[in-house]
Amino acid sequence: MEVVVSRLSKLKCPQCGRQGAWLELPTFPFCSDRCRKLDLYKWFSEEHVISSQLYGEKDDITQSIDELNSDKQ
Ligand SMILES: [Zn+2]
């Protein structure tokens, strides 16, 4: 998805909804690397839902999100 925005525009992070001017950050369109990873992970976990249902396990996903949250680099 591509959105045309001016450099001065405030961007809304698709992950956390925070607004700011991170157009030039490498993490664009996300405000931070953490949000980028979280979104990526969300994307993965949606793909992963079918297989994880086979095991009936959700702790796995929760734990991984916690790991992402603690990853401050
Ligand atoms: Zn964010």
Image: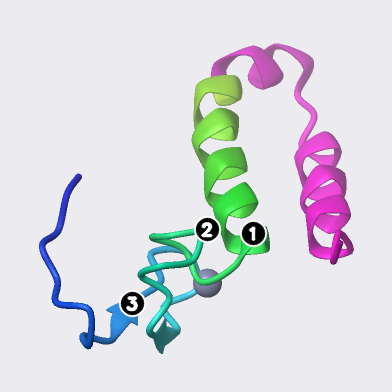
Q: Does residue 9 appear to the left or right of 14 in the view shown? A: left
Query: Which segment is the magenta one?
Result: 50-73
Give the structural element (helix, strand or loop) at label 2.
loop
Name the amino acid, label 2.
Answer: Thr
Q: Are marks 2 and 1 in contact (CB under 8 Å)?
A: yes
Q: CA distance from mark 2 to mark 1?
A: 6 Å
Query: What x and y, as percent, mark residue 16?
Result: 50, 73
Residue 27 is labelled as 2
Mark 2 or 3, closer to the camera = 2
Q: Main secondary structure of the magenta part?
A: helix
Query: What x and y, as percent, mark residue 23?
Result: 35, 70
Q: Nearer the viewer, residue 33 or 57?
A: 33
Give the structural element (helix, strand or loop) at label 1.
helix
Question: On screen, 29 above or below 56?
Answer: below
Q: Earlier in the sequence, mark 2 or mark 3?
A: 3
Q: Does residue 6 appear to the left or right of 53 in the view shown? A: left
Q: Residue at x 52, y 57 (%)?
A: 26
Name the amino acid, label 3.
Answer: Lys
Magenta highlight on residue 51: yes
Quadrant (top left, top right, bottom left, bottom right) of the N terminus: top left
Quadrant (top left, top right, bottom left, bottom right) of the C terminus: bottom right
Q: Nearer the viewer, residue 44 or 25?
A: 25
Residue 33 is labelled as 1
Query: What x and y, as percent, mark residue 21?
Result: 38, 83
